[in-house]
Image (cartoon, helix red, strand yellow):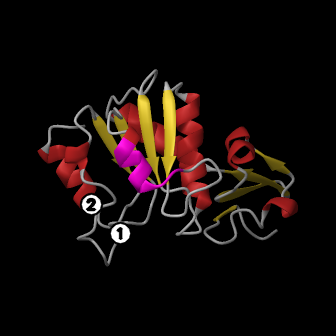
Amino acid sequence: HEFKSINVTIPYKKDVIPYLDELDENAQAIGAVNTIVNKDGKLYGHNTDFSGFMYMLKKHNISIEGKKCVVLGDGGASKDVVASAAIQAVVKHEQAGQMIVVDVIPGNGAITYDECFEKHTDAEFIANTSPVGMFPKCDASPVDLTKFPKCEAVADVIYNPLETKLVAQAKELGMT
């Protein structure tokens, strides 16, 4: 092992696990690794998606405890089940009252966007883990936030552009 640490991205986040000596609890819970650290020849797998999302919530004083949370995207279309799994793990860890997972490909616990608009417009927190709104298709947004009048805060895991259309609309509507 001629390295101190490396990053792992899609589609290898699960594939690397058998080659590692140990996983941290986040990587175990999510079933994926995005950072490998070499400590004296032993390889340790970590998942920073969990801690990164947790940091984003804390930094912006977003509390989701006891609240109804909608997670957009389950990895079906984007093949990045990892981002969604990490965010779902944080939502559970933070003791949300209810978590609704929505995806263009329903199943595996995820519901359709139509069902979300029919039954869950009372959500108080929305997290986007779908690729909708990512560069180069920056003019798209996964949902119209005016349909969610009780929503207090929105988090988007898309980092390009820094402010997605979804986040811009959330700010416009006075949401965190």
Task: Based on the picture, tell me whether residue 83 belongs to the magenta stretch.
Answer: no
Which residues, given as a range, are shown in magenta? 111-118
Residue 75 percent coordinates (x, y): 56, 61
The crowd level at tag 2 (other Cα within 10 Å; few <14, some 14-19, many 20+) is many
- Most common SS among magenta residues: helix
The secondary structure type at the circle numbered 1 is: loop
Q: Quadrant of the C terminus?
A: top left
Q: Say which of 5 and 67 sits in front.
A: 67
Residue at 53 percent of width and 45 percent of height? 87
Residue beneath the point at 61% across and 57% down? 82
Do the CB atoms of the residues marked 1 and 2 lie less than 8 Å apart?
yes
State the residue position of label 1.
134
User: Where residue 30 sits: x, y (%)?
Assistant: 68, 48
Residue type indicated by callout 2: Thr
Q: Earlier in the sequence, mark 1 or mark 2?
A: 1
Give the numbered dot on residue 54: none
Q: Closest to the observer: 59 or 147? A: 147
Kind of residue at disc 1 = Met
Measured as percent of width and height from the top left, residue 105 is found at 54, 63
**Residue 156 vs residue 129: left or right?**
left
Look at the image and tell me in which quarter the N terminus lies: bottom right
On residue 164, the disc is 2
Q: Could you tell me which secondary element the residue under label 2 belongs to?
A: loop
Q: Quadrant of residue 51?
A: top right
Q: Residue at x 83, y 48 (%)?
A: 22
Q: Is residue 48 visible?
A: no
| 156 displayed left or right of 42 | left
Picture quadrant of residue 89: top right
In this view, the residue farthest toward the left is 172
Percent coordinates x, y for residue 132 in the rendering:
37, 66
